[in-house]
Amino acid sequence: MRTVVERLSDSGEFDLAVEGIQAAIRNNQGQPWMYSVLPLEMRLAERPQQEIERALASQVDFAGGDLSQILIAASLSSRLKFWDQAMELCAEATRQDPWQSESWQIAKSIADRSGNKKHILWSRTGILRHVWTSDADQLHQEAELVIRDLLAAAKKSGQQSFSSQINDELTKALTWDLIITARWAGNADVDLAVNEPGDIICDRKNQITGNGGLLTRQSGVDKDRKTEEYRCQKAPKGDYEVVLRQIGGRLVTGNVVLQITRYRGTDREQTKRMLVPVGSKDGRVTIPLSRGRG
């Protein structure tokens, strides 16, 4: 028995749908949904691939750089198995806003479906650098595991050039000039703020700075043990002033444990821990960074 799709195709109804949508667009009657439906109708009408690709590009042009529309176009390109175009759209989305976790998640999904190892590497290193949602630890563990599996497979198959590329990209993703972690016990609400060189403040109101400074929050296993963290991958040279302010609640010991890691992932890596009294007065610590890459 012939399928409904085959009968419709024979009757040319998909071609009629394509012509109708294109006529609306030509006469300035285009709607956002038309740009999403058109490539699918073209595929069903068995139009040439170049025409379908142009329709997908028109969707992005119509969106006017809107991030959500770019991601929709990327997902649609993926559905049509235009893998390279889908990843190019994901790259454009991440250029617009590298800290938008959804873009990296979509890129990861498309890369996995494509099976393209370079796409998989790019999406996973992007997650390691730019995704800091509440489930970041889990996402980072998965990303690093996938990359190391890629590396092992490349070495096993004798792909020396690709092995070197994977190793370099992973090293870059895991290298951070400065990481500042504050931990404390009790139900206290403590704010971590960092005054970067150039008098730029990274705090609860400004969680991502122009220097690349990033303020993350992580909940400990025990609800009474809390953590806040600042990190900067390519940090400018200079002094970083850490300010710890108790907003409310109670610190069990009256102190915050401050851990400072410089040059993470390099042969110059160094970590220092200290107790910082915090209470009626803010805790303040100045951290010099002599070899920042920013």
Image (cartoon, helix red, strand yellow):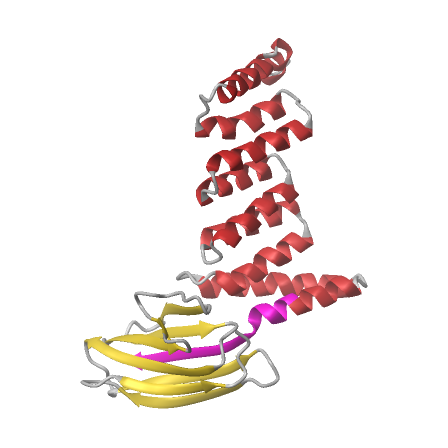
Name above or below for residue 103 compared with residue 15. below
Q: Position of residue 221 (x, y in %)?
A: 36, 72
The one of 25 and 48 positioned closer to us in this rendering: 25
* Magenta region: 169-186
Task: Tell whether position 149 is magenta.
Answer: no
The one of 208 and 221 positioned closer to us in this rendering: 208
Figure quadrant of the N terminus? top right
Name above or below for residue 262 compared with residue 53. below
Q: Looking at the image, can residue 135 be seen?
A: yes
Task: Tell whether position 172 is magenta.
Answer: yes
Q: Which residue is drawn at 20% across and 80% down?
A: 250
Q: Position of residue 66 (x, y in %)?
A: 45, 42
Q: Residue at x 45, y 73 (%)?
A: 231
Q: Is 118 placed left or right of 242 in the picture? A: right
The one of 212 and 170 positioned closer to us in this rendering: 212
Residue 47 figure quarter: top right
Q: Where is residue 209 in the image (x, y as percent from the top left)?
A: 41, 67
Q: Which residue is drawn at 49% across and 62% down?
A: 130
Residue 68 figure quarter: top left
The one of 135 and 24 positioned closer to us in this rendering: 24
Q: Residue furthest right?
A: 158
Q: Residue furthest front?
A: 198
